Amino acid sequence: MKYRHIKKWILLAAIILSGIVSHFSGGINSYYLQIIIFIGINITLAVGLNLINGYTGQFSLGHAGFMAIGAYVAAYLSTEHSAGLFRALGGPNFFSITLLFISVLIAGGLAAAAAGLIVGVPSLRLKGDYLAIVTLGFGEIIRVVIQNTDAVGGPRGYSGIANYTTLFWTYSVAAITIYVVVSLIDSTYGRGFLTVRDDEVASEAVGISTTRYKVTAFVLGAFFAGVAGGLYAHSTTYINPSGFDFQRSIEIVVMVILGGMGSTAGVAFAAILLTLLLEYLRFVSGYQWLPEIIRRIAANRVIIYSLVLIALMLLRPQGLFGRLPRRGIPIGGATKRAKLPALSA
Amino acid sequence: MPSPLLDLRQCTIRFGGLTAVSAFDLQIGADELIGLIGPNGAGKTTIFNVVTGVYRPTSGTIIFENKPIAGLRPNTIARRGVARTFQNIRLFPTLTVFDNVRAGFNLRLRHGLAHALWRMGTFYREENEVARQVDELLEIFDLGKFRDALCGSLSYGDQRRLEIVRALATRPKLLLLDEPAAGMNPREKEISDRRPTGRARHESSHGNLSARNRTGLWNQNRGGNPGASAGESEGHRSISGRRNEESVRSTCFGFS
Ligand SMILES: Nc1ncnc2c1ncn2[C@@H]1O[C@H](COP(=O)(O)OP(=O)(O)OP(=O)(O)O)[C@@H](O)[C@H]1O
Ligand SMILES: [Mg+2]
């Protein structure tokens, strides 16, 4: 087959392109640059969560918790433990910084993935709302734990993080995330995520371990959230626990729903759209000529998410890019029960 | 005498106070076709659920290929070689016909996560082989024309057939069909009665389905004493013999 490796070439092209753009990004207004980086981070977060909530049909509400773990672990390592590495490699030069940054990003990702495993294994037996509540609780626990950890600043936050995150890193990570999810789903192995979403009983009946797929989705999603957290920390150079609260989790969920739960392109696009919208609304809330009430609404993200979701459910319940499956048979319990011929003696 | 493929001994299943199945015995050998009959609520589906691991028996043993399987996870039992269909059809509604059958190949995959990401030669070889076999199965069962349709758009009879194909894709040693002809109109029923021939033909490439048929007559008083008895009756010479037997409602195939 001629196009066999097309996915890999596209990934490589995306990474090179982000490298080139990054190289010439010096002239970009730093405020815009920051927003473009946030967009890339949100793409990573949303596409990763989409593997859990969209493709595998679970409902995780604790994505900001995984992001927080990645952010704090990466920030802590790069701030407190970089001296040795720099000494060994002749000071902070291009090579040593690159090595350091890759290592701390991966470490943050792995820490988040480990947390995903610890939370996922017991709680993925729960379904729907119950799983949502457990993951929500998990996210809050993480936040409270960080708030009470003095080594990373507690409630005051953690500052003095090096500014390593560039367009190149952000969009390379986003491209890799998209590549991983798209490649997985486009394989016989990865279709197992979809069958788990569609019907767990039938999946088990054809030999698909629903637990294994759910945990895999959870761990992968957590890993990417952790890496995204590391990027975020090294972009803002200051993080505090309230930046990873419940609202942040909701924000990522809204991106997934907006993008159509299970359409990677749609979810990535929704991440771009929502990031821009929220940023724009910050200006709106500052426009003095607008009535007070509108400025207040624009400043309140929770109201905005609610409005976005209500509008979506009314106008396009399948999401901006999702396809609504034609369902000939209702799923779940009440299937049409067959009329049987009377038993003859 | 060779030991049976499936051996149910004194199986009892209680749901709270209700005894759905009581001290049930059933032996199925390789190459056997068995029909389970009984009125509504007799416990036919419950037997299937217990054999496939959806429920655990309250007491009794289930031996499959000389190993106890009671209490194993359903996916483990499926990997051991037990496939089934459901009385209320359970396909994967957001997947195409092709992908529904492909799901049946999941358990025999040699590649996993790493291969799906690395995507080198072995990955494509295996994917192509799976696709070829799925298409072959779909052709044998006349579903090739629906290959890329969502399974929900198929007629009821075709959905039942697709579910059987998906079960066969796992290459089972034991196939349990729960009311395979239920809800079909006479024409569809006629088609599905032809199917076992096609299935036998297909399976003969893997094993042999030479029929040594029994019909397990199973009478269970629902109200009174729930003493079950499994009997045997002669006279079902061929697989299609069950066309005459309206009351055979669930079917077990043992493949060798
Ligand atoms: N999960 C369950 N919880 C409680 N009772 C159950 C459960 N599953 C089955 N039963 C009961 O067990 C009995 C046997 O049911 P089962 O579905 O196995 O019968 P069946 O022979 O398949 O009937 P039908 O011909 O209607 O399909 C019924 O009384 C049913 O209500
Ligand atoms: Mg039944």
Image (cartoon, rainbow, N blue to C red):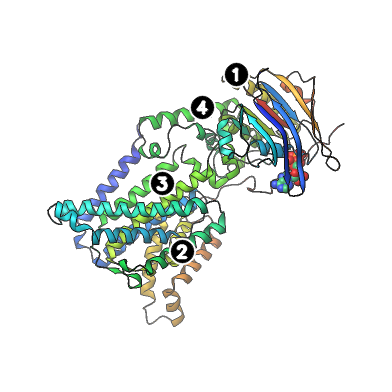
Rounded to the nearest angstrom, the CA distance separating label 3 from label 1 is 39 Å
Q: Which residue is drawn at 59% across and 19% down?
A: B207
- Cβ atoms under marks 4 and 2 closer than 8 Å: no
- Cβ atoms under marks 3 and 1 closer than 8 Å: no
* Residue A102 image position (x, y, % from top left): 26, 51
Q: Name the residue under label 1.
A: B204
Rounded to the nearest angstrom, the CA distance separating label 4 from label 2 is 43 Å
Q: Are both tags, 4 and 3, on one chain?
A: no
Q: Does the closest atom of ligand 2 sit within 8 Å of the Cβ of label 1?
A: no
Q: Name the residue under label 3.
A: A181
Q: Mark 2 points at which residue?
A: A250
Residue A343 picture quarter: top right
* Residue A16 image position (x, y, % from top left): 25, 47
Q: Are both tags, 3 and 2, on one chain?
A: yes
Q: Name the residue under label 4.
A: B133
Q: Which amino acid does label 2 sit on?
A: Ile
- Cβ atoms under marks 4 and 3 closer than 8 Å: no
* Residue A112 image position (x, y, % from top left): 38, 55
Q: Nearer the viewer, mark 1 or mark 4?
A: 1
Q: Residue at x 49, y 62 (%)?
A: A136
Lateral position of residue A256 relative to residue B141, left or right:
left
